[in-house]
Amino acid sequence: MANFLVIGGGVAGLRAAIELAGSGEVLVITKGKVMESSTWRAQGGIAVALAEGDEPELHMKDTLKAGVGLCDESAVKILVEEGVPRVEELISWGANFDKENGKLSFTQEGAHKIRRIIHAMGDATGEEVHRTLMRRVQGIENIKFFEHTFLIDLLIEGEECSGALIMDQNGEEQIIFASAIILASGGAGQLYRDTTNPPVATGDGLAIAYRAGCELQDMEFIQFHPTTLYLPSAPCFLISESVRGEGGVLKNSKGEAFMSEYHEMGDLAPRDVVCRAIFNQMWRTKSSNVFLDMRHLKPDFLKRRFPNIYMTCKKYGQDITRDLIPVRPAAHFLMGGVKTDLNSETNIKRLFSCGEAASVGVHGANRLASNSLLEGLVFGKRAGVSSSKCLGELARPNRARPNKDASPKINFGEIKKSLQELMEEKAGIIRCGKSLKEALEKLEEWDKILEVPLSSQEEFELRNMVTVARLITASALRREESRGAHFRSDFPATDDKKWKRHIVTKRGG
Ligand SMILES: Cc1cc2nc3c(=O)[nH]c(=O)nc-3n(C[C@H](O)[C@H](O)[C@H](O)COP(=O)(O)OP(=O)(O)OC[C@H]3O[C@@H](n4cnc5c(N)ncnc54)[C@H](O)[C@@H]3O)c2cc1C
């Protein structure tokens, strides 16, 4: 029994929970352990206008430019202005960001005109942010955590959300009623074969919100990160953009630096430009990867500045101080999501959303690097403030629900693998009408196969993945132009006249 139910224990969910705790009892559920989140994995840092000579307006300018006409200016203004006190508050709660001569140290990432990214433990910013928020949460009696607790569906009564159907740690289905529900369930990188996202990022919250009647927007915009370690034996490990911010250079398999051919900002061009340049170079040189060259940087500096990247590459036989590091792009971040207003409210009463699951309009067609931890802090707090106003109504005792029959024999693992391959090939960095139609046909087939009683987490996750993949593919097919992270080889130009607008999707219309 709780007044408020928060789905997700990443930066957005934790920040919302902290805000809500003053108003009532908060239950936070996470489908795995609380550390299993994109937040924990974040490396590069947080973009915030705290450096000398920087201002929120300059941060806003870079964010709007990266978003290629689709950012909501008022949302971006809130992000960059409220971002400053949110980060200062985090520091006052004990977050230990890296310093130089006693002052915050700033780095640069793609499409930022200024060094404005603060970082922690070199390249483990997410860990520090998460640890700080968890320390804060653990000191608050009103907040309870249920790990390994899976959101299956939201309960909708009339036009309101009254609670959630969950699967508890023992695999039992339960109904939890709450006065307000905050969906902070993160992104959907697992829809793709190559992704930087953790296994929990299967897009559950997006599919669940869609089934509940929420509006979703900008689903066609998937950001791929240009540089993940590419070795047969290694996992898809992210090599932060700040490596290029500190002087790392992309080279093709012939050892040639190539980014200046593609963009005036060279290696620090926007992510979509770098990804397509890498693809082009891989195709031109018939290679399955390009390389990141850091050998000209001082070994001591590299080890100190990127300890996590140094150690992980070393583990797989690559020394960043001496070797060219094989890299290629991987699915990284979903710009779209559950449409919310500036107070994180969805179109369903008592249902709020924040963080990567939400689309408040700060990213437009392409997220500016390191803006998402900031988004989690700013709009997580806003979600907490607005949902606290729902207190007192609709609170009912929770109840158990008998589990449904076991599912029929379907090879869920096999479909999941095929879906990831399908999305990679047909709805990835470069798409076209033909590839998207083929993907959609296959996804509709799987959707039908999954119209059966489901009973395990793996089964629910797959159904959600198919739903979200359909939403991404259908929106990508509709948008007959190229903009930001969405590139159509059959419509390579940006068409402001027809397409400087959002695609909003809602079940049944
Ligand atoms: C490798 C990597 C590096 C990154 N680096 C940076 C960076 O340097 N700077 C930056 O700003 N951003 C970075 N990002 C992006 C950023 O980390 C994420 O966008 C952000 O942390 C998302 O936070 P969130 O709270 O919305 O979701 P998450 O942190 O992903 O948390 C999602 C939570 O939802 C829970 N959940 C999901 N589905 C269910 C369900 N069905 N039932 C119950 N619980 C559920 C999960 O268990 C988890 O607790 C990076 C991302 C990755 C993957």
Image (cartoon, rainbow, N blue to C red):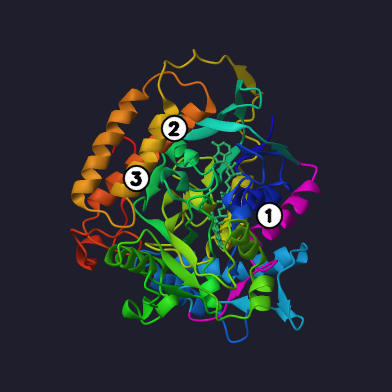
Q: Does any portion of residue 500 appear in the rendered image?
A: yes
Determine crowd level at label 1: few under 14, some 14-19, many 20+ residues with C-alpha closer than 10 A: many
Which residue occupies 57% across, 14% down?
402
Residue bearing mark 3: 423
Residue bearing mark 1: 130
Q: Position of residue 264 (x, y in %)?
A: 36, 82
Q: Is residue 231 magenta?
A: no
Q: Is residue 37 above or below residue 240?
A: above
Residue bearing mark 2: 462
For the residues carrying marks 3 and 1, which lies nearer the camera in this image?
Answer: 3
Amino acid type, mark 3: Met
Q: Is residue 48 above or below residue 488?
A: below
Which residue occupies 60% across, 31% down?
394
**Label 1 residue near ligand 1, CB within 8 Å:** yes
Amino acid type, mark 2: Leu
Which residue occupies 45% across, 42% down?
206
The stretch of residues the image draws in magenta is 113-142
Q: Is residue 423 left or right of residue 87?
A: left
Q: Position of residue 142 (x, y in %)?
A: 76, 41
Q: Position of residue 382 (x, y in %)?
A: 59, 55
Determine crowd level at label 2: few under 14, some 14-19, many 20+ residues with C-alpha closer than 10 A: many
Query: Is tag 2's residue or tag 3's residue first in the polypeptide sequence?
Result: 3
Cα distance between the residues tagged 1 and 2: 28 Å
Displayed quadrant of residue 501: bottom left
Displayed quadrant of residue 314: bottom right
Q: Is residue 139 magenta?
A: yes
- Tag 3 near tag 1, CB within 8 Å: no
Picture disc at residue 361: none
